[in-house]
Amino acid sequence: MFAKRVSIEQVEEGNDLAPKFDADGLIACVTTAAKTGEVLMLGYMNAEALQKTIETGEAHYYSRSRKVLWHKGATSGLVQKVVEMRIDDDQDAVWLRVAIPGDASCHVGYRSCFYRSVPTGAPADQIELTFEEKEKMFDPKAVYGDAPNPTIL
Amino acid sequence: MFAKRVSIEQVEEGNDLAPKFDADGLIACVTTAAKTGEVLMLGYMNAEALQKTIETGEAHYYSRSRKVLWHKGATSGLVQKVVEMRIDDDQDAVWLRVAIPGDASCHVGYRSCFYRSVPTGAPADQIELTFEEKEKMFDPKAVYGDAPNPTIL
């Protein structure tokens, strides 16, 4: 379905979509809020998720914890409409700029998955994370019920 | 050096830095321009790169193609100063907001590695990428000389 990768010039300087999937058949995807530029999440797509995202204009990922195609928002209603889709130089990463209802994205209930900052300039074994979002946008229990938490230890 | 992952609550709702490295010992890192919010690159860090980024406040990655610790900008001079560092809910991804001299980041010569867009709403096998940056910020030959291109087919 996608172009075959034949040369560095084609991949870096051409107009062919010739994505490079990793050993697990995945490509990384960073998703930002089109309105604010905030990074919402970092997910992964397999070939099917990439195809569906392109064809429907709604973000699809591959869930590594559940091992299924994941139409983001199918459970929570927080569907991500693609405003712009980009691909990087060597075509092993995708950037989606999306619009989302309610401005919330993270399964923990925060706007962004990146709701904590890591202080720099100190020894790495003395780090305390700082919460940058003070309250949740929604109650995950009310939205997801008893669905298993996707976080793996 | 980093906290042990003991519970979902600790990882998602706590103040411990307890990163999850993948089977290759890596964690994904999305890097944006602090000034514009533009996504510059998606890279990977091993534990040493994460530690050095925290302690020095300059972005360090692990180069998967060269298999070495990579102090971004050591060759090109385009060092990334960390303005803010964030970590995501399950702590398997880092977001760096950085300041860079000359506003250029990509080894191909563009500002962002994501210099091409992918049109959506069309069949995936009929995609033509569109260049969103019209000209390069620097000449990669002049900056990198004959260093091997990091793109792998």
Image (cartoon, coloured by chain):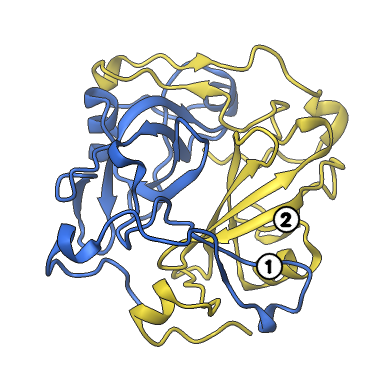
Chain colours: A blue, B yellow
Residue at 73%, 66% in the rendered image: A120
Question: Quick one: SS at disc 2?
Answer: loop
Q: Hey, which residue is sitting farthest front in the picture?
A: A135
Q: Against B114, is B134 above or below?
A: above
Left or right, residue B89 beside residue A100: right
Amino acid type of the residue tagged 2 in the rendering: Ala
Amino acid type of the residue tagged 1 in the rendering: Pro
Q: Against A73, is B120 above or below?
A: above
Determine the chain carrying the residue at label 2. Answer: B
Count of labels in the image = 2
- Label 2, label 1: how many angstroms apart (C-alpha)? 13 Å
Question: Quick one: SS at disc 1?
Answer: loop
**Residue designated by label 2:** B59
Q: Report x, y in % for residue A46.
A: 29, 44
**Residue designated by label 1:** A119
Quadrant location of the N terminus of chain A?
top left
Left or right, residue B101 beside residue B124: right
Q: Hey, which residue is sitting farthest left in the picture?
A: A146
